[in-house]
Image (spheres, rainbow, N blue to C red):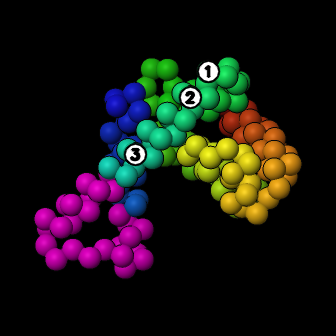
Amino acid sequence: MRRLVDSQDLLSTIARRLCQRVQANRVVAADSRQLWALVFRIGDDALIDRVRIVSRLRALEAADSPFVQMLRARLVGDDGPGGRGFEHEMAAMLESLPTDIDRELLVLWLHGASLADAGEQLGLTPAAARKRWQRLRESIRDHWKENGGP
């Protein structure tokens, strides 16, 4: 897990997600024990998200895809978490995409959906999903090249 998690990045993620819940009035804790249980659950969810994404990238890396190798190097790195942190890199990658559909397509793909399944969930034909995927990959590559990426 040490390769996937930078402790400062994880704490930042937990704090951000907890603040979002507080601002949305979604925190119900009668005592400190319940509050800590919520904090630990948020931490567990953050770790699970990272493991799923990295597992997906490792499974696809066997296909020797340069795009997948670039994602994995940027998000995880070979010697540990990326310099700016997993959460920051994911946020920057998602923000670099021009539309909400592109963001949703990437998230679904990272969580294991095929392009056809992800397209169907988003109301796209398989051909439209593939075309969006092609543009999405180019957009991410361009963003990272402009910002000192691999």
**Quadrant of the rendering where the N terminus is positioned:** top left
Q: Residues within 10 Å of mark 2 (few under 14, many from 20)?
A: few
Q: Position of residue 16 (x, y in %)?
A: 40, 59
Instruction: Say if mark 1 contacts mark 2, CB within 8 Å.
Output: yes
Residue at the spot 54% in from the left edge and 27% down from the top edge:
58
Query: Quick check: 13 above or below 6?
Result: below
Q: What residue would you read off at disc 1? A: 62
Disc 3 residue crowd, few under 14, some 14–19, many 20+, Cα 10 Å:
few
Label 3: which residue?
A: 48
The one nearer the camera, 126 or 69, is: 126
The Cα atoms of the two marked residues, 1 and 3, are separated by 22 Å
Pointers 1 and 3 in contact (CB under 8 A)? no
| Along the viewing direction, whichever of 83 and 129 lies nearer the viewer | 129
| Three-letter code for the amino acid on which mark 1 is drawn | Ala
Q: Which residue is mark 2?
A: 59
Q: Are marks 3 and 2 in contact (CB under 8 Å)?
A: no
Q: Which residues are magenta?
A: 18-43
In this orientation, which residue lies closer to the viewer: 76 or 123? Answer: 123
* Coordinates of residue 100 in the picture (x, y in percent): 70, 61
